[in-house]
Amino acid sequence: MARSLNKVLLIGNLGRDPELKSLPSGSHVATFTLATNRKWKDKNGEFQEETQWHNIVSWGPQAETIATYLKKGSKVFIEGRLTHRSWDDPQGQKRYITEVVAENFVFLDAPPEGSRGGRPPVPPPPESPEDVPGGEEEDVPF
């Protein structure tokens, strides 16, 4: 039995096009936001809806695939882990962010019309940022 678990499973739509950056080590990182929605009936029987926004980060070849094939509005399944980090902004203020580090993903949109199967195979899970030279050590606010 596992003593601890850090696992996040999300299905949602991209809130913006992924932003791909190259690190000095040559590795790539992609960041984007993902919107998930929840609908329910309140005590008065009225339908309510809530949207949650999640910051997603992906590393290595997976980041390149995400940046190439996903765009704002794309529906995707993300499996990953939750992380928190902080940095000092240019004004010296401490900033904090909570992110989901994508370990696996699945395209959920239908392939574009006229394509032959449309998408490349999903690459293997990326190296963790700790294993990527400069991954966690970069002081890059996303």
Image (cartoon, rainbow, N blue to C red):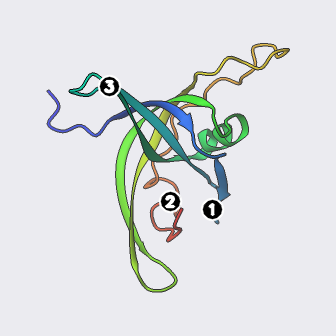
Name which residue lies at 49% across and 45% down: 127
Seen in the image, is 55 located left or right of residue 109?
A: left
Q: CA distance from mark 2 to mark 3?
A: 47 Å
Q: Nearer the viewer, residue 73 or 22?
A: 73
Which of marks 1 and 2 precedes in the sequence?
1
Seen in the image, is 82 located left or right of residue 58?
A: left
Name which residue lies at 52% across and 41% down: 126
The answer to whether residue 83 is above or below residue 80 is below
**Is there a contact, CB below 8 Å, between mark 2 and mark 1?**
yes
Q: Nearer the viewer, residue 86 or 75?
A: 75
> Which quadrant of the figure has residue 120?
top right
User: Which residue position holds label 1?
Assistant: 23
Which of marks 3 and 2 precedes in the sequence?
3
Amino acid beneath label 3? Glu
Residue 99 location, x and y as percent?
Answer: 42, 51
User: Which residue position holds label 2?
Assistant: 135
Residue at disc 2, secondary structure? loop
Amino acid beneath label 1? Leu
**Is there a contact, CB below 8 Å, between mark 1 and mark 3?**
no
Residue at disc 1, secondary structure? loop
Amino acid beneath label 2? Gly
The answer to whether residue 99 is above or below residue 120 is below
